[in-house]
Image (tube, grey):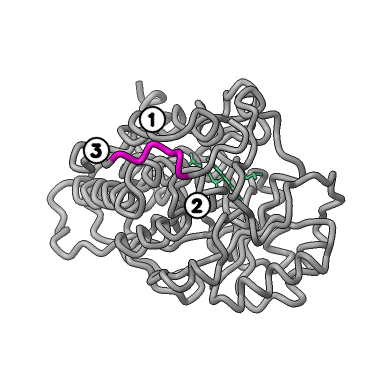
Amino acid sequence: MEGVPPDSLKQEPVDLADFINLFDFEQMAKGKMTEMAYEYVASGAADELTVRWNRQALDAIKLNPTVLTDVSQLDTRISLFGQKLAHPILIAPTAYHKLMHPEGELATARGAGLASALYVVSSFTTTPLAEIAQVATQPLWFQVYVRDDREFTRNQIQEAEAQGCQALCITVDTPVPGVRNREQRGNFRLPAGVTIPHMGGPIVEKKPFTWNDIAWIQSFAKTPVLLKGILNPDDAEKAVQAGVSGIIVSNHSGRNLDTVPATIEALPRIAERVNRRIPVLMDGGIRRGTDVLKAIALGANAVLVGKPICFGLACGGAEGVAKVLQLLTYEFELAMILTGRATIDSIDRSVIWDSFRENKQG
Ligand SMILES: Cc1cc2nc3c(=O)[nH]c(=O)nc-3n(C[C@H](O)[C@H](O)[C@H](O)COP(=O)(O)O)c2cc1C
Ligand SMILES: CC(C)CC(=O)C(=O)O
C-alpha cells in the first residue's frame, strides 16, 4: 500500500439516505477506503478488549424513563468555557483525514458546520489549520501531541491559537503509540503527497512527558487547556490541582493500552472526584443517542465521537460527516424526549436504572 495517492480512494458516490444509524457507516466505509486506511481507523490495540468493552459497557446500562413530563421546549444547548454550542456532541481529534477522503480535514470542517458541531482538529491533520479555519463555521479546538522539542511544541500551539482555535486538548495517554497489531499487519505508511504540516513527523520519542510539561504549556497558552486521556480519578484530581480548564475521559478508543476499562465505567468515579470544579468530557464507543444521554447522566458535560466521523468522511465527505452527526443528535433528542428530559441539566443520575437496588430488593 506504500505510495498510494489519496485519489486512489474509491470515491463512487453513495446515497446517504441509505444510512440510518452510525453502524451503517463502518460497513460502507470498508468498501470505500484502502485496506490500509480501513485497518488503521477500525483497529484497536493488541487484543482489542478495551475496544469491545467501550461498547459492551454502554449497552449494559439500562435507562429509567420518566413519562408525562413537558418536553415541548427541547433544549440541547450547552456552554463550554464560555463557548455556546448547539448540542453536546463534538468531533474527536483523529489523524490523517486525507486517507479517508481527498478533501481531508476541509470536508470534516464543512461537515461540522452543516451539523453545528465543534471540531477538535488533530495535530496529525493532513491540511494546514489556516485552510481549515477558512471553511470552518463552528468553533475549532486543537489537539496537541507534545514533542520533546519544546520550541516545536510552543510554535505549534501558538500557531493553532493564531488560527483561531479556541481550546487546546493535550493528549496525555500516548507518550508512545500502543501495540497496534492490525496497523502493523496493514504496513501502515502515509501515502506519497500526504503530509502532516503541524506535526513534523511521527511520534518516535520515548518522552519524559510529565506534569511539568503541562505547567509549561499553561504558562504561555492563551486558550483553555484540557487534558485528553484521563482514566484514573487520582489523575483527575491532579489535573484540577494543576489548574487545567477541563479533562477528557478517554481510552483513545482502545487504541493505546489494551485492557483499561471502558470509559463509561471510569466516568462516574472521575466525575465524582472532580465534583463539577471543571468540565469533564468523555469519548469512546459513543454510537447511539442513548449513549450520549448515559454519558451525560453519569457526569459528562459533553461527548466526542471519533471512528464514526472517519467512516462518515470516507463514505460521503462533508455530507457524510454531517449525516453521522445529524443521526446522532437526532437520536439524542429522541432519547431526551422518551426519558422525559427537556434540558441537558435535567439529565441526571436518576435517568439510569439502578440495577443494584433492583437486585437487593429482589
Ligand atoms: C483513526 C483514529 C485516529 C485518531 N487520532 C487521534 C489523534 O490524532 N489524536 C488524539 O488525541 N486522538 C486520536 N484518536 C482518538 C480519538 O480522539 C478519540 O479518543 C476516540 O476515537 C474516541 O472513541 P470512538 O472512536 O470510539 O468514538 C484517534 C482515533 C481514531 C479512531
Ligand atoms: C498518529 C497517531 C498517533 C494518531 C492517533 O492518535 C491514533 O491513531 O490513535
Q: Residues within 10 Å of mark 2 (few under 14, many from 20)?
A: many
| Bounds of the magenta segment | 7-12
Would the CB of label 3 be found within 8 Å of ligand 1? no
Q: Name the residue tied to disc 3.
A: 19
Q: CA distance from mark 2 to mark 3?
A: 21 Å
- The residue type indicated by label 1 comes to Asp
Instruction: Return the x and y of residue 280 as percentages of the image width and height.
Output: 54, 57
Closest to the observer: 184 or 92? 184
Say left or right for 223 vs 154. left
Q: Name the residue tied to disc 1.
A: 59
The quadrant of the picture occupied by the C terminus is top left
Q: Residue at x 66, y 29 (%)?
A: 180
The tag earlier along the polypeptide, 2 or 1, is: 1
- The residue type indicated by label 2 comes to Ala
Q: Is residue 126 magenta?
A: no
On residue 317, the disc is none
On residue 92, the disc is 2
Label 1 element class: helix
Say left or right for 337 vs 173. left
